[in-house]
Image: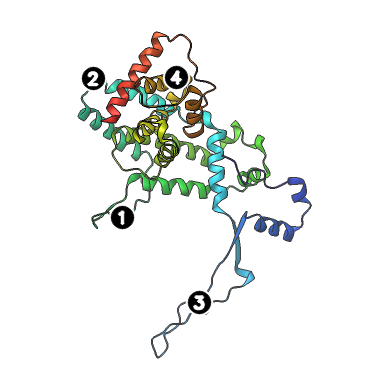
Amino acid sequence: MEYEYFGITDEKKFLELNDKERLDYFINNNIFKQSYALNFNGIPEPSQTGKISLNMELSQDHLEYSFVKEIGAEIYHFLLKSYKLYLGANVVFFQRDFESEIYGLNNDDKRKKGLYYFNEFYKKFGNNLNSKMHFNSKGKRELEARFATLKREQKALESLLLNDFDLVCNFLLGVQGYFNKELYENNELIKQLFYFENNLQILLYLNNTFKYEENEWFSENSISQKIYKDNEQGFASKKVVEFIEFVFSNPLNRKRNFGLAVFHSMKELELINCSAKQFKELCNTNFKCEFKNLQLGNPSNSHLKKVENFKKQWGEFEN
C-alpha cells in the first residue's frame, strides 16, 4: 500500500510558513477539514401557523478544524505494517493448540468446540461494543452480525489515532524513526489496536473454518472474484481461488515450504493452470505472501506429506 499522507509535509518548508500559511497548507492538501460549531439559545416558540424558524449564523468564530479521517485509516495500516512482528503470532499458536484439541473429533463436535472459542474471544473485546439492531432479509429485527460491530470498532480506533497529535505530525512529516519499539511499548492506544487485531485474526480463522457468520466486512472474497474473473482459464473454478485465499489467510501457511505444497497439490489435482512463477506472483500480490521463488528440487518426505494434507483440506473445503 502506498501512503498518500506519510511524509506529505516537508518540515523545513513548513517551519518557514506563518500560522495562516500553515492553515492554508493543511486545507489545500486535504489534511484538515472545516466545520462549524452551531450555537443557538433554545428552541423558539412556534408562530401562529405552527411553524418554528431557526436562524443560525455561520461565523468564523465558530469555525473548527480537524484531521480528515483518511489520515487515521492510513496511520492504522502503517502501524500494522511497522509493527508486524507483534501481529499474527497469536492466531498461529491458537490454531496449533486448537487443532491438537479437536484431533479425532467428528465435524459436529469440532464445530461446537470452535463456537465455544468464537464466543470466548468475542467477549475479550469487552462490554463497550456498540452492537446495533437491523432488519434482516425477511424484515425481522435482529442484532447485527458480530463482524459488522467489529468493523465499526476498527473505524473508531482509526479515529482515535487522530487525537494523538504527536503521532499524526510525525506521520505527516515522514519521520520513520519515530515509530520505534519504545513508541509501541509506551503508547496504550497502539497496544489497544494490536490487541484488537490479534483477537480479530482468531475470530476470522474460526469463522473461515466453520462459517458461523456471513462476513462481508473483513472478507476478501472480492479479491477471489476479481482474480477468477481476470483469469478463468487459470483455475478450475472460483472455489479453487477461494481455497487458496483461505489457506493463506493463516500467516503460518505463508512460509515457502507451505507455498510449495499448496502449488503442487493444486497442480496434481489439475485445479490450476499456471507456472510456479505466476503462482508466486499471485500469492505475493493478493495474499500477503513474500515468496522469492517456488521452484522445487528433489521433493522431501516432508513436502510430500504437506501436499497430501492440502489435497485432503481441499476435499473438505469443496464439500
For disc 1, the marked residue is 133
Distance CA(mark 4)–CA(mark 3):
70 Å
User: Looking at the figure, which quarter contains the C terminus?
Assistant: top left
The 10 Å Cα crowd at callout 1, few under 14, some 14 to 19, many 20 or more, is few
Task: Tell me whether circle 2 and circle 3 mark residues in contact (CB < 8 Å).
Answer: no
For disc 3, the marked residue is 41
Task: Tell me whether circle 1 and circle 2 mark residues in contact (CB < 8 Å).
Answer: no
Distance CA(mark 1)–CA(mark 2):
39 Å
Q: In the rendered view, would you say 131 is above or below 106? A: below
Residue for point 47% across, 29% down: 283
77 vs 205, left or right, is: right
Q: Amino acid at mark 2?
A: Gly
Distance CA(mark 2)–CA(mark 4):
27 Å
Kindly report which numbered mark, 3 or 1, lies closer to the viewer in this rendering: 1
Q: Which mark is residue 104?
A: 2
Please tell me in which quadrant of the rendered image residue 230 appears: top left
Q: Position of residue 22 (x, y in %)?
A: 71, 56
The 10 Å Cα crowd at callout 2, few under 14, some 14 to 19, many 20 or more, is few
The first of marks 3 and 1 along the sequence is 3
The first of marks 4 and 1 along the sequence is 1
Please tell me in which quadrant of the rendered image residue 317 appears: top left
Q: Position of residue 25 (x, y in %)?
A: 70, 56
Distance CA(mark 2)–CA(mark 3):
70 Å
Distance CA(mark 3)–CA(mark 1):
34 Å
